[in-house]
Amino acid sequence: MSSPNAGSFDAKRQHEVVAALNAFMPQGSVLFNEEDTRPYECDGLAAYRQLPMIVALPSNEAQVAAVLRTCHEMGVPIVPRGAGTGLSGGAMPVANGVVLSTARLNKIIKLDPFARTAVVQPGVRNIAISEAAAAHKLYYAPDPSSQIACTIGGNVAENSGGVHCLKYGLTVHNVMRVRMVTIEGEFVELGSEALDAPGLDLLSVFVGSEGMLGIVTEVTVRLIPKPQLARVIMASFDDVVKGGNAVASIIAAGIIPAGLEMMDKTSSRMVEPFVRAGYDIEAEAILLCESDGNPEEVEEEISRMVDVLQSSGATAIAVSGNEAERLKFWSGRKNAFPAAGRISPDYYCMDGTIPRKRLAEVLLGIEKMEAKYGLRCANVFHAGDGNLHPLILFDANQEGEFHRAELFGEEILELCVEVGGTITGEHGVGLEKINTMCVQFSRPEMDAFVAVKHAFDPSSLLNPTKVIPTLQRCAEHGKMHVKHGQMKFPDLPRF
Ligand SMILES: Cc1cc2nc3c(=O)[nH]c(=O)nc-3n(C[C@H](O)[C@H](O)[C@H](O)COP(=O)(O)OP(=O)(O)OC[C@H]3O[C@@H](n4cnc5c(N)ncnc54)[C@H](O)[C@@H]3O)c2cc1C
């Protein structure tokens, strides 16, 4: 072994594990030199980094199972990794651990236009499924903004959402079957290609389990027909409260738009010079409300939404007249994260979900926090789902700014819990939100999560130290869910 990895791990241990993996893995698929492993040290939450001891690149299911079996026997932790676009540190390596990348498991195995399903390997990119299905006028509905890069394995692990999920459901509603490998190297099938599967619904337990229960090796997804027509309304508001209330009013009117997104003034000013989407940069808030279906349905729904928006106080309304204009209106929203780089050296993207009717109140709360922490925040989010994505803007080169950004983010999540929401909508808990888990859940609830984890992974080798905080961690963090013996929101379902 040449040029050992410069990480903080034990070189002897690294040598042993590399030798054990090289016994069955093809040449070039076990990386251990620093120049090869460095690209895997973080995911999209680049503020947190850890050089992995080893990176394994299996090309088939048998190799995945063998890597897992070997690591299990040797007591080596494993972190699964798709494209590494996750924003909560879920794919960040653990010290003395192996990163198992699914980059080489990237084939669409079968596409059945009659059953309207596709069977894909975990490393297939989200958008590649819709591109392959387009020839049959079908597509895969969940559309994270990272869809050109993120993988279906990562989407399953995070239960990812996107603009279209308000109407068509999250990943969990569009995945029918998952084939996965346990830490012991055993293959397990969850769900089925029929509408229902016998026994407990373990597929729903698995989707969103953030790589802690097993490695996804094959996924059957549901495809749906591409709508004949889609049009989008762009509405301006001179007040975020009015914009937030308009979102609640659209849903209250019984309309489920194909997309219902909101951007505040900081976001539209950040993105408009970048993509020229035609956004009203004087508006305090912009709503994008999409309708899809056949032309008659779209016309009727657009007209109903325009009525609601007008009576909610919209100051300007534009409706896309053709597909090019629709895509132009969306281009600003879709490019909001990269556009943040134009006005700030760094940004920290939070992800929390709140009841829609509390949107305006929470946005005002965030505005007050901007003053408290001395940092700007751009709000761009899946308003219809109540899923906020505050982008906290900071400069990591300025001492203390990242720490203030972390505290700012934490306070936003606490406010989400305070108003009856949750600390994550679609980006997962990973490492980023492990402390705020202590605010959201009581110890008995977290013990139940641990019990589920141990049922799949008794030795706690799969993505350890993520998602579920220890009691000690919560005590140190000083945030416990049960306050004065009273559970907040005792009426809400706890799992
Ligand atoms: C610009 C940008 C926009 C984004 N927009 C959205 C959005 O609109 N909606 C949204 O939901 N998310 C969004 N994200 C977050 C991210 O893209 C999603 O969480 C995505 O699902 C991650 O997929 P990935 O392949 O990159 O997974 P990774 O980041 O590699 O991994 C994510 C998690 O999945 C686990 N994992 C990966 N593959 C497997 C597997 N085969 N088996 C078991 N566990 C596995 C990892 O251990 C980790 O815990 C965005 C990210 C960026 C950078």
Image (tube, grey):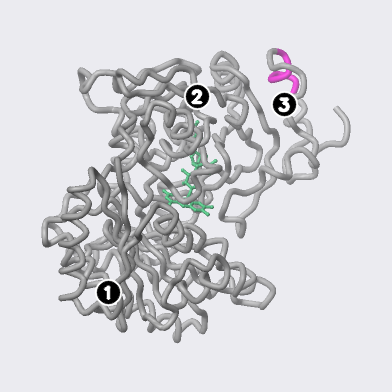
Counting residues from the start of the chain, the first of labels 3 and 1 encountered is 3
* Type of amino acid under label 1: Gly
Q: Residue under circle 3?
A: 30
Residue located beneath label 1 in the image? 243
Q: CA distance from mark 2 to mark 1?
A: 41 Å
Residue 88 picture location, percent across and down: 49, 52
* SS label for mark 2: loop
Graded by Cα atoms within 10 Å as few (under 14), some (14 to 19) or many (20 or more), the crowding at tag 2 reads: many
Task: Name which of mark 2 and mark 1 comes first in the sequence.
Answer: 2
Classed neighbour count for the residue bearing mark 1: other residues with Cα under 10 Å, few (<14), some (14–19), many (≥20): many
Q: Residue at image x 62%, y 49%? A: 42
Q: Looking at the image, is 376 positioned above or below residue 327? A: below
Nearest to the observer: residue 222 or residue 113: 113
Element type where label 3 sits in the image? strand
Q: Which residues are magenta?
A: 16-23
Please name whichever residue, 12 or 334, is drawn nearer the observer in this view of the structure.
334
